[in-house]
Amino acid sequence: MATQSEITAIEAAALRSDRFRLEREGDWKRLEAIVTRMEKGRLRKLSDEDVLALPVLYRTVASSLSIARETSLDAATLGYLEALVQRAWFIVYGPRASLGSWLRRFLGGGWSAAVRSIGLDILVAFALMVAGTAAGWLLVADDPEWYRVLVPSQFTDVRAPGASAEVLRDTLFSDQTREPLAAFSASLFGNNAQVSILAFALGFAFGIPSLMLLVQNTAILGAMLWLYDGADLTIDFIAWISIHGTTELFAILLSGAAGLHIGRSMAFPGERPILEAAAQAGQRASQVMMGVVLMLVIAAMLEGFGRQLINNTPGRLSVGSFMLLFWLGYFFLFRRDADRAVAP
């Protein structure tokens, strides 16, 4: 049986809990009523005073919960306050849009605005990709042994210095994969995604590894351009690569630029703390990268299906040119909702 002192302590705790509830219960009930109406979509029934009072009431009830925890009030009061604070948090700070509305905002201006916000980084990354292509061409032109150093083994089966024009032409106009097109497309997406994620992730090392990765990958392109140019197949090769490359290379360009944007903000944060500058840059770069995933899916489908099914140079050039114009128009001409969509 409980001693008299224990009974006294229990009675004191109950009295303290009742007093605590009575002093604050009015605010709790008002917040609960507002939250319940908003959860049920009855926003028109809320007065202006209730809307303005919502954040104040939330902070008041959150403070009550903190006090209740510190003073070890009864479990019923704690449970009630915890549930109310959680519901109110979603109303005050939680997402205010469904996935569908977020996607419409993202594709309807948010993504393109994020891309334009890192315009300087895109120009730097593009210049390095051009330099990488030129470097790959010049290296193998000076010494063909560089070709096997630069180009991955899966592209050096018969596509190597010394191959005849007929053999090289056959690599452009015959199906070189025995995989079903859907499986082939999925494998291409995985490969391209690895390059893009690396280009973005390495940006945290002040952007330098991202830029080196861009140069390395475009040096492969330059080496292969040199090879096909020697067989008078330059236009055919450009058409072969453009049907997916105008999307794929654009995605890799954006990935590298997004990584550089974060690295540049860390190297030159200005008057802001480095972590704050990196966080703000990361918000913009993450929006760009969400769109890059979509571009890589499209590029994989174009490479896995389009390039195999369209087996002529004019058709491939048409598709590649259309995709390039589409991305340029979307990113740099399409500006609806841009100011609201991009992170500050």
Image (cartoon, rainbow, N blue to C red):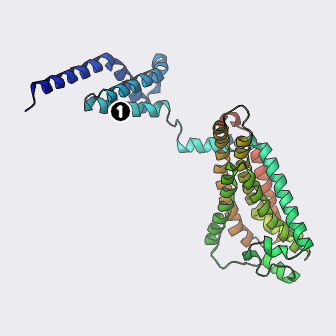
Whether residue 184 is situated above or below residue 66 in the rendered picture: below
* Left or right for 274, reference 91: right
**Is residue 292 visible in the rendered structure shown here?**
yes
Q: Position of residue 116 (x, y in %)?
A: 75, 42
Q: Position of residue 183 (x, y in %)?
A: 61, 71
Q: Position of residue 288 (x, y in %)?
A: 68, 47
**Is residue 332 visible in the rendered structure shown here?**
no
Return the residue nearer the eye: 10 or 19.
10
* Left or right for 76, reference 98: left
Residue located beneath label 1 in the image: 82
* Left or right for 63, reference 255: left
Check the picture and name the quadrant holding the C terminus: top right
- Counting every numbered tag in the picture gives 1
Query: Which residue is at 68% across, 62% downward?
Result: 192
View extreme (left): residue? 1
Whether residue 101 is situated above or below residue 23 in the rendered picture: below
Return the residue nearer the eye: 257 or 331.
257
Query: Which residue is at 92% across, 72% downward?
Result: 142
Q: Amino acid at mark 1?
A: Glu
Query: Which residue is at 67% across, 49% downward?
Result: 204
Q: Position of residue 109 (x, y in %)?
A: 69, 41
Q: Residues within 10 Å of mark 1 (few under 14, many from 20)?
A: some
Whether residue 336 is situated above or below residue 52 in the rendered picture: below
Location of residue 81 by image quarter: top left
> Which secondary structure, mark 1?
helix
